Image (cartoon, rainbow, N blue to C red):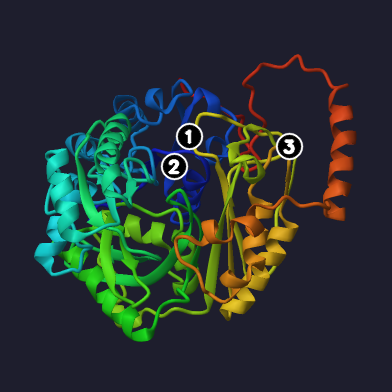
Amino acid sequence: MNKIKKILIANRGEIAIRVMRTCRELDIETVAIYSEADRTSLHVRYAHEAYYVGKAPSSESYLNIEKIIEVAKKSKADAIHPGYGFLSENAAFARRCAVEGIIFIGPSPEVIVQMGDKIQARDAMIKAGIPVVPGTEGEIKSEQEALEIIKEIGLPVMIKASAGGGGKGMRLVKSEADVVSSVRAARSEAKAAFGDDAVYIEKYITSPHHIEFQILADQHGNTVHLFERECSVQRRHQKMIEETPSPLMTPELREEMGKAAVEAAQAVNYVGAGTIEFLVDNNLNYYFLEMNTRLQVEHPITERVTGIDLVKQQIYVAEGQQLDFAQEDLRQLGHAIECRVYAEDPDNNFMPSAGKVYKISDPLGLGVRTDGYVYEGYEIPIYYDPMISKLIVWGKTRDEAIGRMRRALYEYKITGVKTSIKMLERVMKNENFIQGNYDTHFIEKNQEQLMGKDHTEDPVDMVIIAAFIDYLDKLSSVSTNQKEFTPAQSRWKKIPYVNHF
C-alpha cells in the first residue's frame, strides 16, 4: 500500500477547496496551482503550498499538463487529484502521471479512453447486457447513412458527439428535412469543442428523467453503488439542481438500476469513484447514457444521505486500500438537495456576471452546507465556469429538505454580481417540483414562472444594498497604492503568503 503524504490538486475554485478539506482531515499536505487570474483565489490561500502555472486562459494554465507535472515534481507531491472538469477525464494526463511515478487519483488511462468515447462506452454496455437507447452501433460515416438509420428507428432522434459532453455536439432532430443540416452542425461543433467530429444517433426519449448512480470500486475487485441522484432540472443539458433519493424511484427500480450500475463498472474493470448515468422514461424503462470517470459536481448530496466522504474514499482507493464497507452496509438516510449557484443573470438570458463580490451572507443552520470559493472583495474572473458555489441541504423527508432549501436560499445574499439565487428560489416554490412531477423539460415547461422578474425587492435585500452604498463610499477614500495582485492574508495561516514562480 502506498501511503499518500502530499496531493497536488489540479483544479481551482470550490472543488479544489473541497478536496483540500478532506486532505487536512487525513493530515495530508496539499499543493494548489493557480493562473494569473486566480492569484487571490481562496484555494491558493487554503493549501499548504501554491504554485503559479500560467496566464488566465485555461489552455495556458489548468490544462497545461507539462507545467502541472513540473510543479508536482518540484513540490514532491505523491499524487494528483484532478477534481472535475479541466484534466479530470484526460487520459494523456493520467498516463503522464503514471510515467512520472505520481499517483493519479482516478481510473486508468485505458478506462478513461473507453468510457470517454460515447461509441466505445455504448458498445461496452451492450456487451455487458446493460440496456442502451436504441440507435447506431458506431460512428455515422455519411449523411446518407444517417437518413437510412433514422428511417429505421424513427423520429425524433438525438445526434450526439462521440467525444461529447455538456450538451456540445448534440442536436435534436424532429423532421427528416433537418437531418443533413443537423449532422453537419453536430460534427462542426464537436470538432471545435473536442477535436473529434465523430457523431452517432440515438432514439430520442420523450419526457426523460436523468438519473445517475454513484459507484465506488477498489483495486481488489470490490464494487458498490451509493444509490441514485435525480438530475433532471437542467438548462441546455447543464444540471442546475440535484436531489437524492429521486422522487421517481421505486425500491424495486433502485435495486435493479443499482445492480446495473455496478455491473457496468465491473464490465470495464473500473477503479475509483465514478458515475453511471441513465435516462428513465415515464414507464420506468431505463437506458445507459454515459459514464463520468471522475468525481461529480453533485457528489455532496450522496455524501449527506450515506455518510460516506467520497474524496476520502478516492484517496484510500488510490493508496490501494480495500473498501471497508459492503453494499448491504449502505443506506439512504433522509433527503438531500443541491442547488448550483452561478454568477449569471437569469433575467438576461443567463449572461455571465463576472466582477467583484462586495458582500456575502452565507446561509447557516441545521442541515445546511455551502461549498464555495468566493469571499468579500474577491473578483470573479471571466475565464472559467461561472459556478461560484453549491448549496446543499438535508432533511428527514423531501418536504423538509425543500423547506430548508427555501429558507437557505432566502438567507443567501451575494451582492456585486448577478446570481441565480432568485431563480433557484422560484424552483423551490414551483408546484411541479414540490410534487416531484418533473423531467428534463422542467425549465421549458415552467419558463414563465421561473424566468419572471421579481417586481418587488426583499426588504432584507434593500438593507444590504443600502449598506453597500455606504461601504463603497468608504472604499473610495482608501488609498489604492497597492500591488495589483497582492493577496489578502490567509485566515488559515500564521505565516506570510508566498507565491511560487
Residue 29 is labelled as none
For marks 1 and 2, the one nearer the N-term is 2
Q: Residues within 10 Å of mark 2 (few under 14, many from 20)?
A: many
Which amino acid, by three-letter code, is at mark 2? Answer: Thr
Decide if residue 397 is on the left or right side of residue 180: right
51 relative position to 173: left or right: right
- Helix or strand or loop: what does disc 1 sit on? strand
Instruction: Give the residue pinned by disc 1.
Output: 49
- Give whichever of discs 2 and 3 has the lower sequence position: 2
| Residue at x 33% of width, y 34% of height | 76
Q: Quadrant of residue 78?
A: top left
Query: Is 352 left, or right, of 308 in this rendering?
Result: right
67 above or below 456? above
State the residue position of label 2.
Answer: 30
Badge 1 amino acid: Glu
Q: Quadrant of residue 349?
A: top right
The correct choice, above or below, for 253 with respect to 71 in the image is below
x and y, in percent, of residue 342 in the image = 58, 45
Verify CB contact (< 8 Å) between mark 1 and mark 2.
Answer: yes
The answer for how far apart the CA atoms under marks 1 and 2 are is 7 Å
Residue at x 17%, y 46% (from the top left corner): 146
Q: Is residue 378 visible?
A: yes
**x, y percentage for residue 276?**
29, 62
Name the residue located 45 percent from the left edge and 62 percent from the top edge.
232
- Give me the C-alpha separation between circle 2 and circle 3: 31 Å
Task: In the rendered structure, find residue 416 and report the number of the disc placed on it.
Answer: 3
- Check the image and name the residue furthest to the left: 127
- Residue situated furthest bottom in the rendering: 252
Q: Position of residue 63 (x, y in %)?
A: 35, 30
Would you identify the image quadrant in which residue 165 lies? top left
Camera-side residue of 347 and 407: 347
